[in-house]
Image (tube, rainbow, N blue to C red):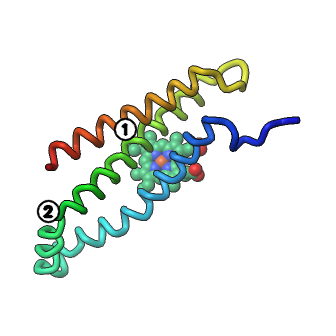
Amino acid sequence: MKKPARTHRLWLAYMLHRLSGIGLVLFLPIHFWLLSLALTDRAAMADALQFTAHPLVKIAEYGLVFLLAVHLFGGVRLLVLEWARPVSNRWTDVHKTLAAFAVALAFAVSTLFFLRAL
Ligand code: HEM
């Protein structure tokens, strides 16, 4: 009997890509709204900018950069797989290595960003 797709380790890569995409979609309208305050309410903008110095915001930024980086590298991984489609559709260890590499790169980029923001 065929195993359900969710038991495959690369299902995690798919879920991470979907959740990071949704996270970015939710973040962007808030980000644009905050930027719009520069035109509509400068005092509120100044308050918001002051709030960004809070340590919790720094941690949230770390998470956000991770989401963007993991979505970017995971997306490039998917595009490379689509362009260089293997003869067989079987998932191999190379695919798992690529997914792990995308997550590792995303951790490296977001952690560097976080360390510089401290
Ligand atoms: C940074 C460069 C980006 C790359 C290289 C990229 C790449 C991709 C790729 C290849 C897919 C298709 C995944 C699939 O076939 O299953 C995808 C899906 C998606 N992307 Fe991006 N993306 C990027 C940026 C963004 C941004 C900025 C957002 C949000 C504002 C976003 C939101 C999404 C969403 C919601 C999906 C659908 C996920 C799903 O259905 O599972 N992406 N992305």
First in sequence, mark 2 or 1: give its number.
2
Give percent across and percent down for residue 44.
16, 79
Q: Which residue is mark 2?
A: 53
Q: Quadrant of residue 115?
A: top left
Query: Is the residue indicated by label 1 positioned so its CB lies within 8 Å of ligand 1?
Result: no
Disc 2 element? loop
At horizontal 13% and vertical 75% (from top left) the residue drawn is 47
Q: Which residue is mark 1?
A: 106
Looking at the image, which is closer to me, 115 or 94?
115
Instruction: Say few, some or many: other residues with alpha carbon within 10 Å of mark 2 (under 14 / 14 to 19 / 20 or more).
Output: few
Q: Is residue 102 toward the left or the right of residue 89 in the image? A: left
Disc 1 element? helix
Q: Is residue 3 toward the left or the right of residue 104 in the image? A: right
In the image, what residue type sits under mark 2?
Ala
Instruction: Say few, some or many: other residues with alpha carbon within 10 Å of mark 1 (under 14 / 14 to 19 / 20 or more).
Output: many
Total numbered labels: 2
At horizontal 62% and vertical 41% (from top left) the residue drawn is 11
Which disc is residue 74 wearing? none
Measure how far apart labels 2 and 1 are at the Cα level: 23 Å
